């Protein structure tokens, strides 16, 4: 389950920021997760609650902001929605798609004390 490793990385980011910005408690964490990122949001929630124990984020509210997949279709020259990789373009049926959104996995915001 790579979600555990991802959450460990999020905690490392939070702890590094706490040292740099001098805060001691995290009230909320917002993560952007793209639809094409291969991350299971519910598994991530579970892992975050386990990994954040005994850290400055132990009591933090954990929020996920979903980012839909999008791609640029080279055939019809349009930005189109993309639910999963290797789907055809919903406009023209072509397969020459360049992903432009939906691969994100980033700490978007922290609410701290």
Image: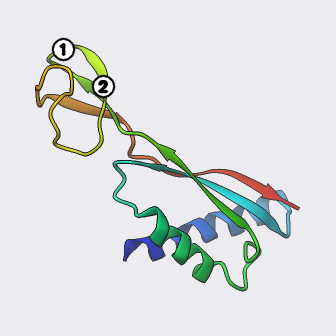
Q: Is 94 on the left-hand or right-hand side of 99?
A: left
Estimate how packed mark 2 is, as few (under 14), some (14 to 19) or many (20 or more) residues with alpha carbons within 10 Å.
Answer: some
User: Pointer 1: what residue?
Assistant: 76
Q: Residue furthest top?
A: 77
> Does residue 73 appear in this view?
yes
Specify the quadrant of the image occupied by residue 38. bottom left
User: Pointer 2: what residue?
Assistant: 80
Of 73 and 83, nearer the camera is 83
Q: Is 53 on the left-hand or right-hand side of 103?
A: right
Estimate how packed mark 1 is, as few (under 14), some (14 to 19) or many (20 or more) residues with alpha carbons within 10 Å.
Answer: some
Q: Is 110 on the left-hand or right-hand side of 5?
A: right
Which x, y percent locates residue 75? 14, 17
> Does residue 6 appear in this view?
no
Which x, y percent locates residue 6? 48, 68
- Secondary-structure class at tag 2: strand
Which x, y percent locates residue 69? 36, 39
Residue found 37% across the figure and 53% down from its top: 37
Q: Residue furthest right?
A: 113
Residue found 70% across the figure and 69% down from its top: 15
For the residues labelled 2 and 1, the Cα–Cα distance comes to 10 Å
Q: Are marks 2 and 1 in contact (CB under 8 Å)?
A: yes
Which x, y percent locates residue 63? 63, 57
- Secondary-structure class at tag 1: loop
Q: Is 53 on the left-hand or right-hand side of 59?
A: left
Up/down of 86 relative to 62, above or below:
above
Location of the C terminus by quadrant is bottom right
**What colouring does the structure picture have?**
rainbow
Q: Residue furthest left?
A: 94
Location of the N terminus by quadrant is bottom left
Up/down of 55 relative to 20, above or below:
below
Residue found 52% across the figure and 77% down from its top: 47
Residue found 62% across the figure and 70% down from its top: 11
């Amino acid at each position: 389950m790579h979600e555990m490793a991802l959450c460990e990385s999020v905690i490392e980011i939070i702890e590094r920021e706490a040292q740099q910005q001098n805060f001691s408690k995290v009230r909320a964490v917002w993560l952007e997760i793209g639809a094409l990122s291969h991350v299971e949001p519910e598994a991530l929630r579970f892992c975050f609650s386990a990994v954040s124990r005994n850290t400055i984020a132990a009591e933090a509210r954990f929020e996920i902001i979903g980012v839909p997949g999008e791609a640029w279709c080279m055939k019809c020259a349009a930005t189109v929605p993309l639910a999963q990789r290797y789907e055809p373009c919903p406009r023209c049926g072509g397969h020459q798609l360049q992903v432009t959104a939906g691969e994100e996995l980033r700490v978007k915001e922290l609410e701290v004390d």
